[in-house]
């Protein structure tokens, strides 16, 4: 457990070199915009997406300009989101020995731990995480779930069902926003779509300006649902060459439309680059739910989007997690390898 970031934060009086963000890292020198943009990350009312054309247009505009939006009226009660925040805190507050029971194995992604080290020159993220496969059901590995915490399991399972429902609403709305048949993206999900829950813990860092909670990346899923804490912010999204802060909006979910949707939409939707800054005083906890097609299945641009004027931009690919992670840790983008 020596190398968990929360322990380094508690015991080290010098920042280990592996965490120091490199100045020459791609995106490292992009200007930091003010805390948020003049117009802000768009807010979309999910309850209107089936009935209002103007909300569908706003969704399309949000995704083609920012790649993300703050979803309100998504159908999950604020009190339930508080339970998700509560179980996340509950896990990270367990004793080191208890958390260790969920420790991931060296070459595995799933479980509790910090960055997987895949290369010698990899900069480490200032974060500890608990990474759990939640769908398909038969791929759950309960040995990585906190033991003796029925409440944790109940809340995660219920949250997973609720996110699955919203994911479908968003996928259909995205298809309709492009005048496509509403199931065209869902059809690529196959019969065993995948969902991963990642609980992120960013301890306060005495060297906050020298590290990143997460280095710049775009997500390898199709849609990511992020639940932020209520007070401490840190997420930034890249737009027009500047980083903008993504505020925490009460009871909203931050939704990113990401790599696999970029491929399926033949590049109309652009997977947003984002990164996380950390605080020198406060810890921050977030929960990301990564939703994506069945991983054994090829995905590709939907037929209706390929025309003489808009030729195919991406190959058909199996977007595996291993393929994604290798690129992530080297600071490159897997999506680039899928371009024709
Ligand atoms: O914690 C955050 O604010 C962002 C999390 C994120 O980008 C991720 O888990 O990929």
Image: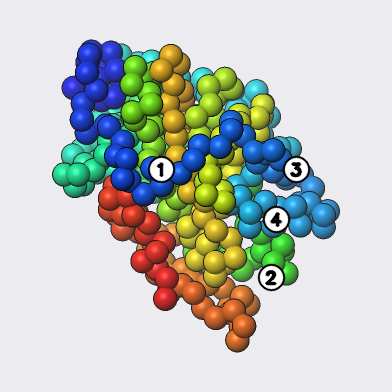
Q: Tag 3's secondary structure?
A: strand
**On-image quarter of the N terminus:** top left
Above or below for 157 versus 208: below
Q: Tag 4's secondary structure?
A: helix
Which of discs 4 and 1 lies nearer the camera? The answer is: 1
Determine if residue 224 is in view. no
Residue wearing tag 4: 61
Identify the mark nearer the N-term, 4 or 2.
4
Name the residue located 64 percent from the left edge and 44 percent from the top edge. Answer: 69
Residue wearing tag 3: 45
Quadrant hosting residue 36: top right
Residue in the foreground of this view, choosing between 134 and 179: 179
Extreme left residue here?
A: 120
Quadrant hosting residue 10: top left
Q: Tag 2's secondary structure?
A: loop
Identify the mark nearer the N-term, 3 or 1.
1
* Residue 78 x, y percent position in the rendering: 67, 26
């Amino acid at each position: 457990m020596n190398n968990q970031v929360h322990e380094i934060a508690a015991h080290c009086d010098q920042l280990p070199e592996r965490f120091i963000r490199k100045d020459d890292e791609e995106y490292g020198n992009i200007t930091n915009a003010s805390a948020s943009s003049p117009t802000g990350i768009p807010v979309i009312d999910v309850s209107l997406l089936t009935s209002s054309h103007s909300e569908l247009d706003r969704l399309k505009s949000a995704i083609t300009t920012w790649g993300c939006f703050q979803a309100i009226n998504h159908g999950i009660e604020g009190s339930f989101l508080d339970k998700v925040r509560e179980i996340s805190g509950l896990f990270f507050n367990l004793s080191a020995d208890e958390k260790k029971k969920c420790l991931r194995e060296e070459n595995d992604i799933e479980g509790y731990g910090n960055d997987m080290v895949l290369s010698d020159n990899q900069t480490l993220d200032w974060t500890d995480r608990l990474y759990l496969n939640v769908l398909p059901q038969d791929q759950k590995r309960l040995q990585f779930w906190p033991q003796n915490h029925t409440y944790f399991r109940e809340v995660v399972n219920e949250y997973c069902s609720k996110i699955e429902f919203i994911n479908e609403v968003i996928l259909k709305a995205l298809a309709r926003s492009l005048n496509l048949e509403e199931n065209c993206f869902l059809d690529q999900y196959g019969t065993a779509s995948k969902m991963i829950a990642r609980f992120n813990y960013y301890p306060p860092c005495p060297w906050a300006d020298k590290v990143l909670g997460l280095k710049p990346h775009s997500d390898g899923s199709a849609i990511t649902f992020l639940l932020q804490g209520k007070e401490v912010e840190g997420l930034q999204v890249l737009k027009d060459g500047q980083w903008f802060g993504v505020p925490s909006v009460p009871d909203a979910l931050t939704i990113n439309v990401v790599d696999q949707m970029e491929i399926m939409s033949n590049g109309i939707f652009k997977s947003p680059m984002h990164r996380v800054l950390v605080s020198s005083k406060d810890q921050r906890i977030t929960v990301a739910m990564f939703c994506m097609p069945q991983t054994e299945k090829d995905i590709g641009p939907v037929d209706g989007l390929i025309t003489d004027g808009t030729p195919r931009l991406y190959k058909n690919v199996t977007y595996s997690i291993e393929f994604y992670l290798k690129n992530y840790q080297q600071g490159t983008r897997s999506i680039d390898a899928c371009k024709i």
